[in-house]
């Protein structure tokens, strides 16, 4: 069975602080994909990143960085120098191989981030 | 990039009435679409998987007679909430699984539909 755990329900940081959002996943598949989405108050999911299970390279995109470690089944997300606009709910998700017709998304419970000016 | 639209973006209806929500893939074909439901301050939970030309597959605990799903074409899936009640008030999000056209079966999410039943 697939499962995604985001242990942090709510986080508050002061602007310009760095913050790391944790994500731990469970799956028996050897091929899978991991995602992070941002959900602002409007509700629309904003895609941030997708990693496949064979690519453990960490990635940096501007102030965002991701640390994928298969050994600990974690896919953590760090925002550097946080800004007020980063305030949102962030979801980590897992999907099975794209060739699997049942490749629904399994979402974590989300982490609500508040950046205080 | 691939775009998925949902209509309406929000709807208020009276208890006992039915509401139809449309999910369209605008620039790609989607043989499979997924419907998720999100209650306030909660995660997204899969309700059903919709396959073009066949019956939808519902997740455990989701009433198929209450949440009617139709996937009549490769670009449109509809979710009809029949005899809606206040407890059906939620945020409904669809995703479309792209096939071919260089999309490699990627999924794209719609912007969501906020349903309020009074």
Image (cartoon, rainbow, N blue to C red):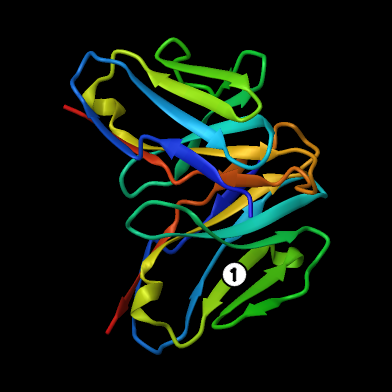
Instruction: Please give left or right for residue A45 compared with residue B31 in the image.
Output: left
Residue placed at 51% from the left, 51% from the top?
A108
Residue B65, by quadrant, is top left
Vertical placement of residue B21 versus A106, above or below: above
User: Pointer 1: residues within 10 angstroms few (<14), some, or many (20+)?
Assistant: some
Q: Residue A34 occupies which quadrant of the picture?
A: bottom right
Label 1: which secondary element: strand
- The reply to whether residue B34 is visible in this rendering is yes
Which chain's residue wears label 1? A
The extreme top residue here reads: B65
Task: State whether residue B4 is above or below residue A89.
Answer: above
- Write down the quadrant of residue B32 in the picture: top right
Image point (54%, 54%), residue name? A5
B52 up-or-down from B101: above or below:
above
Q: Mark 1 highlights which residue?
A: A76
Q: For this view, does B109 lie left or right of residue A113? A: right
Which residue is the extreme one toward the front?
A: B27
Left or right? Give the position of A50 relative to B92.
Answer: right
| Front residue of A104 and A7 | A104
Q: Position of residue A14 (x, y in %)?
A: 32, 85
Which residue is painted at 40% across and 89% down in the image? A16
Report x, y in % for residue A79: 50, 79
At 64% from the left and 55% from the top, the residue drawn is B1
x then y, percent, for residue A19: 46, 80
Left or right of A9? Residue A34 is right
- Evaluate whether residue A1 shows in this view: no
Residue nearest the viewer, comparing B100 with B54: B100
- How many numbered discs? 1
Instruction: Give the image location of residue B56, x and y in percent.
Output: 59, 18
Figure quadrant of the C terminus of chain B: top left
């Amino acid at each position: 069975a697939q499962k995604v755990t985001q242990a942090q329900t709510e986080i508050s940081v002061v602007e310009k602080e760095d913050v790391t959002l944790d994500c731990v996943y469970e799956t028996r598949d050897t091929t899978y994909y991991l995602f992070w989405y941002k959900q602002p108050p409007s509700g629309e999911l904003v895609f941030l990143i997708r990693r496949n299970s064979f690519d453990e390279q960490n990635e940096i995109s501007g102030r965002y960085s991701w640390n994928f470690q298969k050994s600990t089944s974690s896919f953590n997300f760090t925002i550097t120098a946080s800004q007020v606009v980063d305030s949102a709910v962030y979801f980590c998700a897992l999907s099975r191989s794209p060739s699997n017709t049942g490749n629904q998304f399994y979402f974590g419970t989300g982490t609500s981030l508040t950046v205080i000016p | 990039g691939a775009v998925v639209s949902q209509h309406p973006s929000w709807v208020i209806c009276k208890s006992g009435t039915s509401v139809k929500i449309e999910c369209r893939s605008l620039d790609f074909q989607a043989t499979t679409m997924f419907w998720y439901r999100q209650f306030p301050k909660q995660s997204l939970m899969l309700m059903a998987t919709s396959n073009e030309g066949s019956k939808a597959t519902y997740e455990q605990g989701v009433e198929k007679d209450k949440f009617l799903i139709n996937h009549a074409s490769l670009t449109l899936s509809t979710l009809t909430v029949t005899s809606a009640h206040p407890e059906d008030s939620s945020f409904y999000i669809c995703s479309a699984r792209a096939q071919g056209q260089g999309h490699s079966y990627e999924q794209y999410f719609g912007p969501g539909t906020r349903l309020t039943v009074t």
